[in-house]
Image: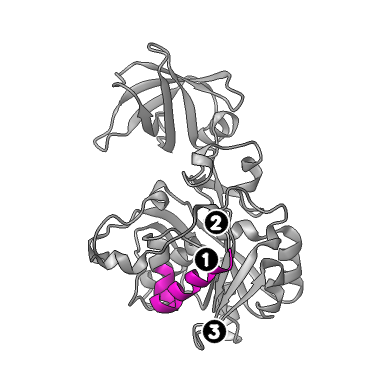
Amino acid sequence: MSEMDDYDFELPREQIAQHPLPNRTDAKLMLVDRKTGEIDHAHVRDLPDYIHPGDALVLNNSRVVPAKLVGYRAQTRGRWQGLFLAADQQTGVWEVLTKTRGTLVDGELIIVQDRQGRDALNLRCVMRTDQGHLLVKPEAAGSPVELLERFGRVPLPPYIRDGQMVDSDLKDYQTVFANRPGSVAAPTAGLHFTEPLLRKLGEQGVAISAVTLHVGIGTFRPITADTLDEHRMHSEWGELAGATCEALTSARAKGGRVLAVGSTSVRVLESAALASGGRLAPWSGQTDLFIRPGHQFAGCDAIMTNFHLPRSSLLVMMSAFASRDLLMKAYQEAVRNDYRFFSYGDAMLIY
């Protein structure tokens, strides 16, 4: 028996949400009280009843880039897929994670097709990296973000329609407050918020602040090691700006709570606190922090999160905050009560 068996659960396939609800705030909201162990049920639209005046809400403002590229090899006409990872600003060369039949050679041409299936963008192969990623150079003017917004597709996780996007995903798989491009996956707890809900929270005295964590491809990867000690966390870039840090510190000083929306916001806050000896301070940089049982939370007092995949680092993170026994009890209740799971699913408030 592996240590990871403690973070496994059975989930009926029909409870994996394939589309968001027409109104984001109609999603169910499970309430988990860490002190009493009580579990209750509400809806996201009821959040103003559970977030108090003086509390601070922390959102991840990273914007999903349409980083999935679909096309074919000009020489063989064989199908090709890639996922944009990064770009060299000086050379204009892109680093791409690729999926194709056969071996691509230096100088080979890839034709990327737009979302309507039309030939749209030429990529010239440069070389492979030591990690097996492909370096390509676009034969078109424009920044990476501009070209991806025109020709890329939303890189949906495989549990949503086998990763096949529809036009509505361009809006649905993006938070209403996203303004810093850089993620290949949405900070999904933030998908539940609408502008009217945020406005209502602000009007009742909740401080609304933003951090940035650009969600990387590692978010799709389950823990494959048998023990938590063996797992190596992926690295992502994040930032806690000075003004946000000041707002959160002020809220706490007046008796308010810091409520992090999503595991990505938690990761920024805890990385910042860890870098400053256990207190919140401005921070930016790469983080490979793996939050697991035993972690002493210093950056947040409550967490709003979606329901995560079995055996995932995100499930382990929430177990560290709520306790494994309480969290797995909550997940079992969610299955019994037909909660919708994963990116387009329902939410949980742990406090």
Circle 1 SS class:
helix
Q: Amino acid at mark 2?
A: Gln
CB of mark 1 within 8 Å of CB of mark 2? yes
Which residue occupies 34% across, 53% down? 234
Q: What is the number of the mark on residue 272? A: none
Q: Which residue is mark 1?
A: 335
Residue 313 lies, in percent from the top left, at: 37, 61
- Distance from label 1 to label 3 (Cα)? 17 Å
Q: Is residue 322 magenta?
A: yes
Count residues near mark 1 (Cα–Cα under 10 Å), then give few for <14, some for 14-19, many for 20+: some
Q: Is residue 257 above or below residue 194?
A: below
Which residue occupies 53% across, 41% down? 161
Q: Is residue 155 visible?
A: no
Q: Is residue 22 magenta?
A: no
Asked which quadrant contains residue 232, the reply is bottom left
Which residue occupies 43% across, 75% down? 321
Residue 108 lies, in percent from the top left, at: 35, 16
Q: Amino acid at mark 3?
A: Glu
The nearer-to-camera label among 3 and 2 is 2
State the extent of the magenta-drawn residues as a range: 317-338
Q: Which residue is mark 3?
A: 38
- Distance from label 1 to label 2 (Cα)? 8 Å
Q: Which residue is mark 2?
A: 15
Which residue occupies 42% across, 53% down? 237
CB of mark 1 within 8 Å of CB of mark 3? no
